[in-house]
Image: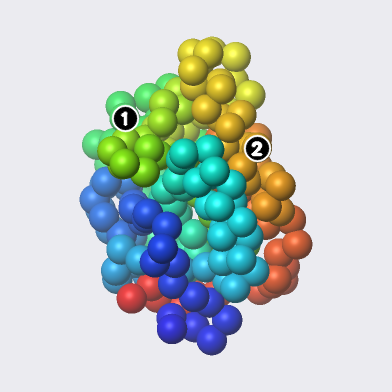
Amino acid sequence: MPHEKFFYVEHIPCDIRYATINNFVGRPISGYLANKCVVSMEVYKALNIAQATANKKGLSLMIFEAYRPLKALEDILQWSKTTDTSTKERFYPTLEKTSLFDLGYIALRSTHTRGAAIDVTLIDPNTKQELGMGTEFDFFGELSHTASPNISAEAKANRRCLLEIMEPAGFINYEKEWWHFTLKDEPFPNCYFDFDIN
């Protein structure tokens, strides 16, 4: 196990983007030594409930991010101070990277680092195709706000479906990111962890 209070999620599809080059920094982020999903036991149990609900709808969750080491946030902060804008067009076309923290898109002390948050979408379990949500994961801008009026009717319906799956399982959505959910009764509200994902 990665940590005595945390567990790997292996039965739900995962693509932990910060362990790859497919993210807004454009490279693997500090602390992500493997593309593995790590969560607290409480999040693990709630995810099982959510996945069961998704399965009843003929869908599956796909996890993009879960536990995040504290060192990763420091790495992202340092990236925000560089002149590298190679991912701007894809992830933050209308914003300056230096504003991503102030605007609430990235937190210096994240619920991910407390082991309480999960970033998810929905997929077709047969084709593995993601449902259209109006933006991709980690798109920074108003289109990613959960209740954005400027997305298609299909995307609005898919976001509602995701909420209807996650909220009864005990998660609360972050209104600026349709994919971000925090466990209501988080297990470590005052702890920030820094062990690597490996």
Tell me: 71 left or right of 153: left
Residue shown at 28% from the left, 38% from the top: 127
CB under 8 Å between callouts 2 and 1? no
Q: Is residue 27 above or below residue 197?
A: above
In the image, residue 141 lies at what x, y percent? 50, 27
Q: Is residue 18 above or below residue 3?
A: above
Chain-order first, disc 2 or disc 1? 1
Of residue 30 and residue 16, the one placed in the foreground of this image is 16
In the image, residue 98 lies at what x, y percent? 46, 39
Q: Which mark is residue 53?
A: none
Residue shown at 63% from the left, 37% from the top: 163
**Residue, disc 1:** 90
Of residue 17 and residue 81, the one placed in the foreground of this image is 17
**Residue kind at label 1, given as amino acid type:** Arg
Residue shown at 58% from the left, 32% from the top: 161
Quadrant including the N terminus:
bottom left
**Residue, disc 2:** 164
Estimate the spatial distance between the alpha carbons at disc 2 and disc 1, rounded to whole Å. Answer: 28 Å
**Residue kind at label 2, given as amino acid type:** Glu
Can residue 5 be seen here? The reply is: yes
Q: Residue furthest right?
A: 185
